Amino acid sequence: MEPLLRPSNTIDWVTILLFASLLFVVIAKSMFYSRFLNFIILPFNNKYIFMYNKKDKLGNWFHVFFTIFQLINFSLFVFLARNVLLQMPNDANPTLFLVITGAVLTFFILKILLQLGNGFIFGSSKVLSEIVFKKLSYLNYSGLIMFLANIALSFVATDSEIIVYAAILLILSINVMGWTAALQNHQKFIASHFFYFILYLCALEIAPLVIIGSYLNH
């Protein structure tokens, strides 16, 4: 028999990307094992929030590692979900992924800077930094769901809309839990800045979901 030459699958870059993102979780676990154990049960127990909602909470290396992990998998999930929903080939050029990553990273940086900047202007930096930490913690946790969904969409069921929608539902559920916890713990602050809170909710929370939803369906 003559050997058949098979074209190499260009999703190799996705494999490398997933492995690289997982390294951040491994490093975070090895360096902050007890913190990792509290983080992994975050949706079922708020112990992580109460224990680590302190000084330098956003700059802690555990939080930084998981934020990088989440950003990589968030961008990859948008990329893969778009391929599935628009029925595009799985070996699409990674240039689009880089564009998505740049857009996601820019948005997150601007969003955090605006939140912390408004906290400084209104003299509520401590409260806003606590809210940002809580929301980012839940978003980072949902990065684990994105990671599993990315593996499934890359190697198991590459064209499964069920996986895409199930992952979106789980991601939204986890982040709604984070929002609910933040609202419950800062009711007085929100009530005293209600108009600002509504503007913030529409501009920085709802609008991005609408934009991403429109992007995935067009």
Image (cartoon, helix red, strand yellow):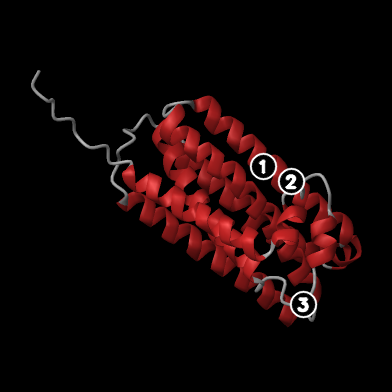
Residue at the farthest right position: 188
Residue 60 in the image: state x and y as whole percent: 67, 72
- The residue indicated by pointer 1 is 172
- The residue indicated by pointer 2 is 176
Query: Which image quarter is the C terminus in?
Result: top left
Instruction: Give the label, 1 or 3, closer to the camera.
Output: 3
The answer to whether the residue labelled 1 contacts the one labelled 2, judged by CB atoms less than 8 Å apart, is: yes
The structure residue drawn at horizontal position 41% and vertical position 51%, both measured from the top left corner, is: 17
- Picture quarter containing residue 44? top right
Q: Please, is residue 192 above or below residue 214 in the view?
A: below
Instruction: Give the label, 2 or 3, closer to the camera.
Output: 3
The structure residue drawn at horizontal position 65% and vertical position 65%, both measured from the top left corner, is: 63
- The residue indicated by pointer 3 is 55
Query: Which image quarter is the N terminus in?
Result: top left
Disc 1 to disc 3, how far (Cα)? 28 Å
**10 Å neighbourhood of mark 1: few (<14), some, or many (≥20)?**
some
Secondary structure at badge 2 equals: helix
Looking at the image, which is closer to me, 143 or 3? 3
Disc 1 to disc 2, how far (Cα)? 6 Å
Residue type of the residue flagged with mark 3 = Lys
Left or right for 81, reference 59 = left
The structure residue drawn at horizontal position 74% and vertical position 61%, both measured from the top left corner, is: 35
**10 Å neighbourhood of mark 3: few (<14), some, or many (≥20)?**
few
Residue type of the residue flagged with mark 2 = Val
